[in-house]
């Protein structure tokens, strides 16, 4: 049973470009979460999705950020018009019940 | 809103010895879960141990155990017989029983000396 798969592992974008981060949850998991980790900090919740539905997006910036978890395919976190402050590690987690299992994260660098 | 505080930015332990990492949290809820995650340099978040708030017995996983003090809102992690592979960032996390998202502390870097 493969774990949570995130790609790419590293992503470099110029200011103003779009970043797309992908997450495939563990088999059988229907809950997906996105977290952001800034350097030297803990993970901060961004958004919680179930298939085709956003359940809680209270941690997501109102502008430029969006997330989806379509019926088929991976969950996507999209950041439009990236700025330097978006540079961080973005983690996806999936769960079935209590425990959340994390992917290895995508490190986004905005230059 | 719930908060999680890890007051030790960095800790060191000699190989084979025991170390305790501190965590306190703030919540008005009575039913919740607490977790310790390990993040090695690979960046992978690895679940170390989990505690249900309704359980009085402290959770144990091999060399890892917790001291859960519900009234004091304290949840410390004890690592016995420390190994070089234990060196990592450790995060304490809270999850409401009725919720889904995790609230993390800022982390404690654990260094293991040989």
Image (spheres, rainbow, N blue to C red):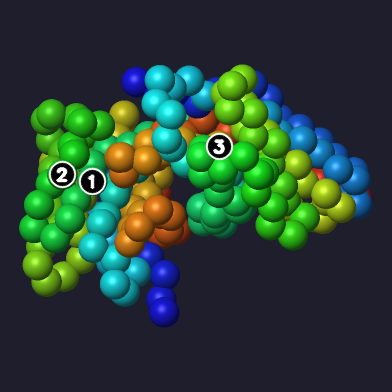
Figure check: A68 above or below A14: below
Q: Position of residue B15 (x, y in %)?
A: 89, 50
| Chain letter of the residue beneath label 1 in the structure image | A
Mark 2 lies on residue = A55
Residue at the spot 77% in from the left edge and 55% down from the top edge: B63
A79 or A59: nearer the eye?
A59
Residues under numbered marks 1 and 2 in contact, where contact means CB atoms less than 8 Å apart? yes
On the question of residue A37 being in view, the answer is: no
Query: What is the quadrant of residue A1 in the picture?
Result: bottom left
Q: Position of residue B75 (x, y in %)?
A: 62, 32
Q: Position of residue B73 (x, y in %)?
A: 57, 23
User: Alpha-carbon distance for marks 2 and 3?
Assistant: 24 Å
The label on residue B37 is none
On the question of residue B56 being in view, the answer is: yes
Query: What is the quadrant of residue B56 in the picture?
Result: top right
Residue at the spot 31% in from the left edge and 40% down from the top edge: B98
The reply, left or right, for residue B36 in relation to residue B65 is left
Query: What is the quadrant of residue A73 in the picture?
Result: bottom left
Q: Quadrant of the N terminus of chain B?
A: top left
Residues under numbered marks 2 and 3 in contact, where contact means CB atoms less than 8 Å apart? no
The label on residue B92 is 3
The label on residue A48 is 1
Figure check: B14 above or below A63: below
B104 or B110: nearer the eye?
B104
Decide: few, some or many residues near mark 2? Use Cα within 10 Å; few <14, some 14-19, many ≥20: some
């Amino acid at each position: 049973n493969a774990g949570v798969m995130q790609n790419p592992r590293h992503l470099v974008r110029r200011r103003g470009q779009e970043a797309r981060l992908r997450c495939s949850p563990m088999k059988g998991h229907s809950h997906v979460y996105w977290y952001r980790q800034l350097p030297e900090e803990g993970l901060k919740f961004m958004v919680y999705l179930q298939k085709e539905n956003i359940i809680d997006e209270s941690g997501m910036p109102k502008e430029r950020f969006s997330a989806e978890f379509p019926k088929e395919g991976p969950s996507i976190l999209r950041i439009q018009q990236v700025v330097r402050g978006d540079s961080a590690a973005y983690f996806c987690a999936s769960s079935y019940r209590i425990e959340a299992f994390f992917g290895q994260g995508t490190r986004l660098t905005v230059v | 809103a719930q908060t999680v505080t890890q007051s030790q930015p960095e800790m060191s332990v000699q190989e084979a010895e025991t170390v305790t990492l501190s965590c306190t949290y703030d919540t008005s809820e009575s039913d919740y879960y607490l977790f310790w995650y390990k993040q090695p340099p690979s960046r992978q978040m690895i679940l170390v141990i989990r505690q249900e708030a309704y359980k009085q017995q402290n959770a144990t996983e091999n060399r890892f155990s917790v001291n859960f003090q519900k009234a004091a809102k304290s949840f410390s992690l004890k690592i016995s017989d420390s190994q070089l592979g234990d060196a990592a960032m450790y995060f304490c996390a809270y999850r409401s029983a009725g919720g889904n998202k995790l609230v993390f502390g800022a982390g404690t870097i654990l260094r293991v000396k040989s």
